[in-house]
Amino acid sequence: MAPLIGVFDLFRIGLGPSSSHTVGPMRAARAFIAGARGMKGVARVEVTLFGSLAWTGKGHGTDVAVIAGLAGMTPDSADPDEVHGLPARIAAEGRLDLPGIGLVGFDMARDVRFDRATPTTGHPNTMTLRLLDVSGAVLAAETWFSVGGGFVVRDGEADAAAELPPALPYPFRSAADMLGHCARDGISLSAMQFANECAVRDAATVRTYIVAVAAAMEGCIARGLMQDGELPGGLKVRRRATTLAARIEDKRRRNAGAATETMDRVSLWAIAVNEENAAGGRVVTAPTNGAAGVVPAVLRFMRTYHPELGAEGVEAFMLAAAAVGALAKTNASISGAEVGCQGEVGVACAMAAAGLAAALGGSPAQVENAAEIGLEHHLGMTCDPIGGLVQIPCIERNAFGAIKAINAASLALAGDGTHRVSLDEVIATMRQTGLDMHDKYKETSQGGLAVHVTEC
């Protein structure tokens, strides 16, 4: 277990459309089966989804993700086409191969249940998995919580990711802690986070992973710019990235580029990523899949308009972003089912703003200020996906989050780091706002746009 929340936790290569509803359940199901390896007499496996997983799990592909996890697949290595083809294959064969256990009878309609009536207590994203014998007797059972960003916790176990043991050179639980470390040792926020990362893994491993994550983000943008057609799910939402890109290039060829061209490109890159996510493609959780377009779009902005920053700039960006994401997860939440979209796009905006400010040479106080500005202006944002799909308003929302992140970094860098509201205060406010927010606005598709827009 890594004794910190860092780049390996907040930036995970996986599959869309949701980190909490797709990546997390897949990981939980795989862990459950791995723990039962070698068990005899198993005739069936049964999964029950509760809370937000039940309300929007169908639209988020939770049922398919769980089956993939039961089959031994992992989000970072599974082939998207193979995952999406599982329902048809299981329907034809009527069985599922559980690694280390063998073939069991399986019927998706019978064995994956969406329980919307039973209240959840541990977390809004709750799932129970059971192995049964031929008589229906329970051989093994576990309850898991998908707590956002692909993080999962087995019921009865502490969230290991929340622990910060003293082995770290710079343990922190607040932005004030971070700024104190930086001031005392005269280091940047990115350097502080790098030292913590290197307390767990060697420097070469950390740097290699950052390069791989940045490349995966670039690859996702590239794929999104090449795809066309209608997104799955029934809303008849058509991909726009290729059309938007063509219009930008057409204006450039005619020497009619608008003053908003840079902003248009950032929006385009974010939309390209989230269209890939909505289609169930490979994306990088940052810090969630629903908010996966913000960080890549701002990173592409930095690499395009500040190429002089090079690999060191990318490293500084990702490390500072991870530090801010860790604060949000530790002291509030990055789960839309817990705090609404303020915890997803809002936190992604704060992470990207901090990353950009750090890469551009901002002081620790300026980096913290950039994150604070980015998150502050997402406070209260609900999570109300139409049809339970990560499409409307999620895709466009990422474009706006990316634009806000650049603006937040710019505003922070224009000052000296002094500001009235702290990042710690904004994170605490986000947590309280999430507690006060009605459940219908927290990824259940029971309120907001999800009920007021009935035709698309």
Image: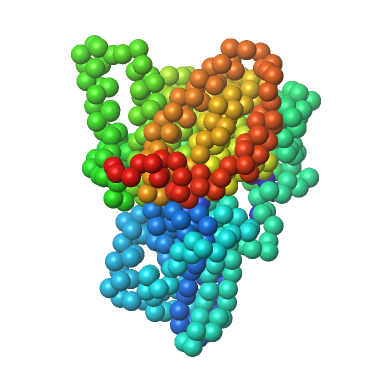
Is residue 404 placed above or below 16 in the rendered structure? above
Residue 127 in picture, x, y percent from top left: 53, 63
Is residue 272 shown to the viewer in this render?
yes
Camera-side residue of 185 and 111: 111
In screen coordinates, is 360 left or right of 450?
right
Q: Quadrant of the C terminus?
A: top left
Q: Position of residue 336 (x, y in %)?
A: 53, 45
User: Is residue 359 among what the camera can see?
Assistant: no
Q: Is residue 253 left or right of residue 21?
A: left
The reply, left or right, for residue 288 in relation to residue 201 is left
Name which quarter of the figure residue 433 lies in: top right
Residue at 43 percent of width and 68 percent of height = 112
Residue found at the very far bottom of the displayed protein = 135
Q: Quadrant of residue 301?
A: top left
| Picture mark count | 0
Q: Residue at x 51, y 80 (%)?
A: 132
User: On screen, 380 above or below 387?
Assistant: above
Say whether residue 161 is left or right of residue 28: right
Decide: is 116 above or below 348: below
Which image quarter is the N terminus in?
bottom right
Residue 315 location (% of width, % of height): 55, 31
Residue drawn where x is 58% and y is 73% of the image:
141
Q: Which residue is at the front of the view, 31 or 318?
A: 31
Outermost front residue: 452
The colour scheme used to paint the residues is rainbow
The percent position of residue 229, horizontal first and vertical second, equals: 23, 42
Question: Which residue does the image show at 57% across and 61% down from the upper left?
Answer: 119
